Amino acid sequence: MEQSLAGQTVSVDDGGYMTDSNQWNGEIAKDIAQQLGIELSEQHWAVINWLREQHAQGVEANIRKVGNSGIVNIKEFYLLFPNGPLKNASKIAGLPKPTSCL
Amino acid sequence: MNTTKTTKILILGAGTAGTIMANRLAKQRRRDWDIQIIDEQATHYYQPGFLFLPFGRITESAITRQRAGFISKKVAYTQKPIDKIVADQNKVLLTDGSELPYDVLIVATGAQIAPEETPGLLGDLWHKQIFDFYTFEGAKALRDYLKDWQGGRLVVHITEMPIKCPVAPLEFSFLADDFFKQKKLRDKVDITFVTPLTGAFTKPVASAKLGHLLEERNITVVPEFSVEHIDNAQKKLVSYDGQEVPFDLLVTVPTNKGSAAVQRSGLGDELNFIPTDHHTLQSKAYQNIFVVGDATNVPASKAGSTAHFETEILAENIARFVDGQELKPAFDGHANCFVESGNGKALLIDFGYEVEPVEGTFPFAGIGPLQLLKESRLNHLGKKLFRLIYWYILLPARPLPFITAKLQLSGKKLTKK
C-alpha cells in the first residue's frame, strides 16, 4: 500500500515499513521519526546511516551487531530508539521490518 | 578434483549433525574417500531429554550414550579438542600441536550456551536459584532443586535469538504447569514467560496458537524484553530499557553461540555461527568447507530435525563437489518439531524458510495420523518414541520412512504463498 510521508507518496507494508528503500530520504526519515515521537540527533543519524550501509551490503542487522558497531552500545541504542530499537530504527531508515531467526 | 588419489573428508564435531553426516558418507561406500571425525567430548546426550530431566520424567541413563558407539566402523574417530581451522592451508590444528589436513571440511561444531554474555547470570545464584536446562549439569541441578521447591515466582526466560530448539522454553513452561498441578502446588506458583520476541513464537499462526495455550494455563507472557543484566541481590531481571521482572526461581535460556574454535579460526559471525549458503550448505568463504547443524548461520530452526534433513542434502552435495559437479540448492529450511504441551499431549509443527507452521495432517495429507499445530495424545507418544528413533534410526543414518528432507505442502492449511 501507499502512504504520504514528508509530502511524498511512498510504498509501505502493513506495519508502515517502506518497501522500496530507494524512495527514502532524510525528510521522510524525520517524518517517520516524528510519528514515533523521536527527534533525530546526530547520534540517531549515525545509527540510521550505519543500518542503511549494512542493508546495502546485504547484511541483516541485529541488536548485537549494532552494539558491536562502535557507534552506540546496546543501552544507548535503547535510549535513542525506545520500545523496540531495531524495529524503530529500521523503520526510520526506510528498511524492511527486521526478522527474527528461528 | 583428482579422482585417482584419496579424498580426505574431515568432520568437526560428533554431535547430532556430525554423527549422521559421518554415517551417511560411510554408506555411500566410496573407496577413494578417507572419512575422519573428531570431537573432544566422549558423551553423546539426547538433548531433547534435557526438557524432561528437570521434572524427573526421564532418567539420566536414557539420554546418555558414548559417541564412539554411534559412528560407523568405516569412519576414523578421534576424541581430541581442536584449536582452529587454517582454511588457507586446508588443515585443522589440534590443541596437542598435531595437524589434520583435509580436502573437504564439514563443520558440525554446534551451538552452546554462553551465560557469560549476560552480566550477573554466572553470579551467586547460578545453579542455585538460576538454572539453564540446555546442559546436562543445568537440567540435573534444576531437577534436584524442583524436588523440594515450595512455590513462588517461576520465571522462564529467553535471553536472545537464535537459540537451539526455539520451542523448548514454551514446552518447559507447559510441563512446569503440569508438574506443579500434579504436586498440588500450582496455586502457590506464579509462572511468567519472558521473551525478546513480540509473542510466544515468531511465526504468526503458531504464535497465536501457542500464546493461547499459555493463557489457558495461566502463564503470563512478558514480550519484547531484552535482558541487560541479572540482579542477584534483589533477584530480578533488568532490561536495557529499565523494565524489571522479579523471580524466586529463574529458568533461563542464555545466549547461544557457535564454537570458540570457529571464532579462533576467523570463520564465524558475531555469535560464532558460520556464514553458509542457505540452500547448498557450502560456507560462503571457502568452497571446500561445508557447514551442517547448529553451526550454520542459516535462518532455519536450530533443531535436530533440521540437522537431519540438512545431512541428506549435504551428503549428496559432498559427492557432487568431489566429482566436480555443480551443487544442488536443495535445502529449504525444513524443521519438524513436537511441542510438548503438558497433560500427556503435544503439538507437531512442520515448517521451512518460506512456510510457517500451520494446521494440517502429517505425514499423509488428509489422513495424518499426526495432527499439525493441534494438541493430541498421539503427538505426545510420537515425541516419547522419538528418543528411540533418534538412537536407532537417525544417528545411524537409517532411512526414516515417509519423512522427506523436502518440506511437503500437501496436508497443510496454507492461507497464502
Image (cartoon, rainbow, N blue to C red):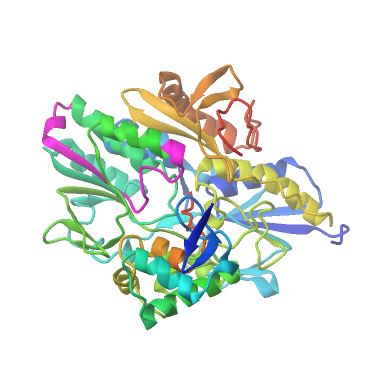
Q: Nearer the viewer, residue B178 or B40?
A: B178
Q: Is residue B61 above or below residue B85?
A: above
Q: Is residue B93 visible?
A: no
Q: Is residue B152 above or below residue A31?
A: above
Residue B193 falls inside the magenta stretch:
yes
Q: Is residue B18 above or below residue B102?
A: above
**Residue B376 in which image quadrant:** top left
User: Is B248 inside the magenta-drawn segment?
Assistant: no
- Span colored in magenta: B183-206
Q: Residue at x 44, y 22 (%)?
A: B381
Q: Residue furthest right?
A: B4
Question: Residue B291: x and y, percent?
Answer: 62, 56
Determine the image quadrant of residue B378: top left
- Tell me: B43 left or right of B306: left
Q: How many marks are shown on the rendered structure?
A: 0
The picture places residue B13, in percent across and down from the top left corner, at: 55, 54
Q: Residue at x 41, y 19 (%)?
A: B377
Which quadrant is the N terminus of chain B positioned in? bottom right
In this rendering, would B16 be left or right of A39? right
Instruction: State the residue lying farthest toward the front.
Output: A7
